[in-house]
Amino acid sequence: MSKVSPEVEALAQQRLAAEESRITGSRRTAVTLRSTFGEFVRHPSPWMILAALLVALGWRIAEGGWRLSDLWGPVVLVVTFPVLEWVIHVFILHWRPRKVAGVRVDSELARDHRRHHADPRDIPLVFIPWRSLVFVIAGYYAISLLAFPRLGQGLTFMLALATIGLLYEWTHYLVHSDYKPRSRVYKAVWRNHRLHHYKNEHYWFTVTTAGTADRLFRTYPDPATVRTSATAKNLHNLEGHAPAE
């Protein structure tokens, strides 16, 4: 790994400080949570996930047969979600384009995520692209309906998946919005994700939590010990270069 010049390091540090100051600085007019939510609902992915949630809820109520065992799937999902989030971020969103058997493999999710890193302030790029989300929701429904011994159990799991998906979209959007962090928990999540975008893209991969799966996979270092990456806004240094094969 080549050493970054002091000029690049200083510029990146200045960029991170300016971004934090722009959002949290006392001179900036506060953005309300209500106005922030108003922008959130203008995008398709929250509505698509909400629709999936409401379908699962209605279907689950109609199915009936509630059992305590319905809860084990959602409990496991909640406990393991930071790890799943980390894995998806690292291996799907940060996928490096390559050719497999002569075919270029580069999903819309990975392409849009590179664009998201190039311009973290471009709000539409914060959301899951709707074309990909269609397949994601269909895949989640397939897993929920086929992986459990009872339909009710699978539908309960789908409810949990959709709820967490909606929470993920909201949290990710909120972090990239102009909303000022207030609680200690949200401020930790906010700073964690901004370090990923403005300090070094090889660390701080969780979005809805801070210091969970990143600690487990050793991607939660002291920011002062990490060099500022020259490619945080140009993942894999692909801009102007042919994709790896």
Image (cartoon, grey):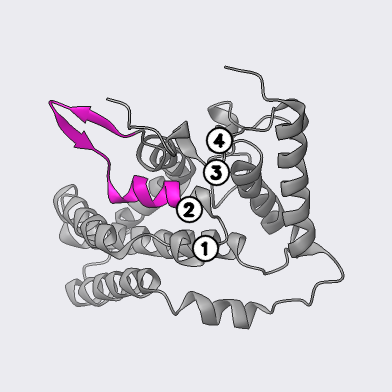
Mark 4 sits on what residue? 231
- Which residue is identified by label 3? 233
For the residues marked 1 and 4, what is the alpha-carbon distance in whole angstroms?
18 Å
Q: Is residue 239 above or below residue 109?
A: above
The residue at 25%/70% (across/down) is 56
Relative to 10, does residue 18 appear above or below in the rendering? below
* Vertical comparison of 184 with 224: above or below: below
Label pair 1/2, CB-CB below 8 angstroms: yes
Amino acid type, mark 3: Lys
How far apart, in angstroms, are the residues tagged by discs 4 and 3? 5 Å
Q: Secondary structure at mark 3?
A: loop
Residue 73 position, x and y percent, is 33, 50
Dot 1 or dot 3, earlier in sequence: 1
Disc 4 packing (10 Å; few <14; some 14–19; many ≥20): some
Q: CA distance from mark 3 to mark 2?
A: 8 Å
Coordinates of residue 79 in the picture (x, y in percent) = 47, 44
Disc sitting over residue 116 in the figure: 2
Count of numbered marks: 4
* Residue at the spot of label 1: 122
Tell me the CA gap for discs 1 and 3.
Answer: 13 Å
Position of residue 172 in the picture relative to residue 129 (left or right): right
Answer whether residue 109 is magenta in the image: yes
Q: Amino acid at mark 2?
A: His
Write the start and end of the magenta stretch as one range. Answer: 97-116
